Amino acid sequence: MKHISSFTLFVVAFLGLISCSSNAQEPDAATGEIDKEHIVIVYLSRTGNTEAVADIIHQEVGGEMVELKLETPYPEDYDAIVAQVDRENERGYLPPLETEITNIEEYDTLFIGFPTWDMQLPPPMKSFLSEYDLSGKTLIPFNTNGGYGLGSSIQQVEELCPECNILDAFSIKGGLERDGIYLAIKGERRDQVHAEVTDWLQSIEIQ
């Protein structure tokens, strides 16, 4: 009986070790946690709405925040910037960026935020994605627009970054500059957007 009892105890202890080892490996795979020290949030914002979403993301996941700025800023006048962006898109012109990220290789995960301009990716974001080698990195797009969605922007991100892991985008209505509605994501509206961003981050297993 002693022999049987000892063998039984051995089996129980062995199974217990297997169970502990298995449980110890589950959290990383299940939660989708990422290293917050290797996150950068790169965004373009004209009226402050995309910046508001970038700030909410930063509150939730941390990382560095980098605003894209041009060497020659766009005009303040709405009609003038619309005309300029139209010309840039027609010619495939990529406006030079003032912003530089000298340590881009240190980041594994990039949130990229932009408004929808001309129903596509804004030229400055095209400049950014064309300027840096982001191969092997995870890209997470987020977008604000006047109520007309992403247009072809995600397709353009995929074309510019074919070697990246691109997660599902977040898109939400912001202001409508044409009608004089600028920063719309503020006050109670910001709280609503914050809740939607949180749900989105959970859906892509980032939090």
Image (cartoon, helix red, strand yellow):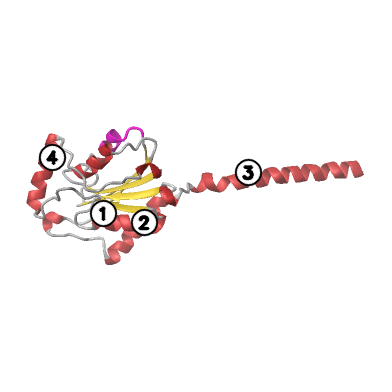
Residue 69 at x, y percent in the picture: 21, 50
Q: CA distance from mark 1 to mark 3?
A: 42 Å
* Main SS class of the magenta portion in the image: helix
Mark closer to the chain start, 4 or 3: 3
**158 in magenta:** yes
- Residue extending furthest toward the right: 1
Residue at (70% x, 45% y) in the render: 17
Kind of residue sitting beneath label 3: Ser
Residue at mark 1: 50
Q: CA distance from mark 3 to mark 2?
A: 32 Å
Q: Nearer the viewer, mark 3 or mark 2?
A: 2
| The residue stretch that appears in magenta | 156-163
Q: Dot 2: what SS?
A: helix
Quadrant in the rendering for residue 182: bottom left
Residue at mark 3: 22
Mark closer to the chain start, 4 or 1: 1
Q: Quadrant of the N terminus?
A: top right
Q: Give whichever of 29, 112 is nearer the camera.
A: 112
Task: State if disc 1 and disc 4 touch (CB < 8 Å).
Answer: no
Q: Nearer the viewer, mark 4 or mark 3?
A: 4
